[in-house]
């Protein structure tokens, strides 16, 4: 995890899915006046340049957000996500990509609170600098988000959204995510939790969604986007998913409207597809 820099992957297909879901969650959870507590366990640097630095080395955004940038025919939920990306590109050119902290800043209100964790030293410093002018409602913690989660649950308002999206570079993340969720639900059973996970040809990745379903038991939603057939060499990300505990009522409808368009826009071969499952009490 300490060697991971999200800038290499900023704006790729996995970011598009994750942040589209995040925008929908924030939109729906801020409809009520009561304050919302947003926790991001692996927040990253806040916002990423697509013109220089890490992002241009692999240019993964070219097969991600860039494929949506000029579209004017997107369904309303996807159009909303795209408008949030355009906030950090005021001249109309795709130059920057907002990470989850920036999206949360844009979509939360004065009464809401953000707690952002980042373990990577350089990323954490970048995030602290990025959020310097955000005011008292934003707190940046240079530390382990899994450990920090235990200290902040339940939130004072008893309304919360938790985003958990480790890099999964180390096998320990596949154990840490279910463990964190068991503990979190014991402390704050009614919170909304969004877990991003990769689609990879490895046993731990394949088993993780099933583990999360067993932990959730009821009131869950799982969406995944496959953009290509798994690589022949067994390496590489061929898609990703988001598992949501206690999803808002209208989230599934927004995803059903948008996911076919994401498959069409981001799919790289004839095995591109999406899957959407849910269960409610």
Image: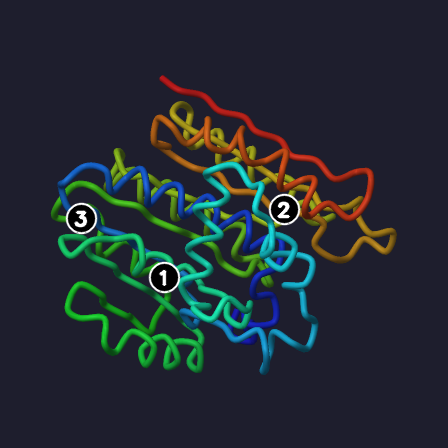
- Badge 1 local density, few (<14 within 10 Å), some, or many (20+)? many
Q: Earlier in the sequence, mark 2 or mark 3?
A: 3
Between the residue at mark 1 and the residue at mark 3, the CA separation in whole angstroms equals 15 Å
Q: Which mark is residue 205?
A: 2
Q: Earlier in the sequence, mark 1 or mark 3?
A: 1
Residue drawn where x is 68% and y is 48% of the image: 266
Residue name at image x 48 percent, y 45 percent? 79
The spot of residue 264 in percent (x, y) is 70, 40
SS state under label 2? helix
Residue 205: percent from the left, percent from the top?
63, 46
- Within 10 Å of disc 3 (Cα), the crowding (few <14, some 14-19, many 20+) is some
Q: Position of residue 31 (x, y in %)?
A: 23, 38
Q: Check whether the beta carbons of the residues at disc 2 and disc 3 lie within 8 A of each other.
A: no
Taking the spot 19% from the left edge, 46% from the top edge, the residue there is 154
- Quarter assignment of residue 104: bottom left
Which residue shows up at 33% across the image and 74% down it? Answer: 142
Task: Answer left or right for 145 relative to 67.
Answer: left
Q: Nearer the viewer, residue 30 or 3?
A: 30
Q: Which residue is at the front of the view, 149 or 250?
A: 250
Most foreground residue, 254 or 113: 254
Q: CA distance from mark 2 to mark 3?
A: 30 Å
- Kindly indicate whether the residue at mark 3 contacts the one at mark 1 (C-beta within 8 angstroms): no
Badge 2, how many Cα within 10 Å: few under 14, some, many 20+?
some
Q: Return the residue at label 3.
A: 155
**In this rendering, the label closer to the viewer, 2 or 3:** 3
Q: Secondary structure at mark 3?
A: loop
Q: Which residue is mark 1?
A: 145
Looking at the rendered structure, the secondary structure element under dot 1 is helix
């Amino acid at each position: 995890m300490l060697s991971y820099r999200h800038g290499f992957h900023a704006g790729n297909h996995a970011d598009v899915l994750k942040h589209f879901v995040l925008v929908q969650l924030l939109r729906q959870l801020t409809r009520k006046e009561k304050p919302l507590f947003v926790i991001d366990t692996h927040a990253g640097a806040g916002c990423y340049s697509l013109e220089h630095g890490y992002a241009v080395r692999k240019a993964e955004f070219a097969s991600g957000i860039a494929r949506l940038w000029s579209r004017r025919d997107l369904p309303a939920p996807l159009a909303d996500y795209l408008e949030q990306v355009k906030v950090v590109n005021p001249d109309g050119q795709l130059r920057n990509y907002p990470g989850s902290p920036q999206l949360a800043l844009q979509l939360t209100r004065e009464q809401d609170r953000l707690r952002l964790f980042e373990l990577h030293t350089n990323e954490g410093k970048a995030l602290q600098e990025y959020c310097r002018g955000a005011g008292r409602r934003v707190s940046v913690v240079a530390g382990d988000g899994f450990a920090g989660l235990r200290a902040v649950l339940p939130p004072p308002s008893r309304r919360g959204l938790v985003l958990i999206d480790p890099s999964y570079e180390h096998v320990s993340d596949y154990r840490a995510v279910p463990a964190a969720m068991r503990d979190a639900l014991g402390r704050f059973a009614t919170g909304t939790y969004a877990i991003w996970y990769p689609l990879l040809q490895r046993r731990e990745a394949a088993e993780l969604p099933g583990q999360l379903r067993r932990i959730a038991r009821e009131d869950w939603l799982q969406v995944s986007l496959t953009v290509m057939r798994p690589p022949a060499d067994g390496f590489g990300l061929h898609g990703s998913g988001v598992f949501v505990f206690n999803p808002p009522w209208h989230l599934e409808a927004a995803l059903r409207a948008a996911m076919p368009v994401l498959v069409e826009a981001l799919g790289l071969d004839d095995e591109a597809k999406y899957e959407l499952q849910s269960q409610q009490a």
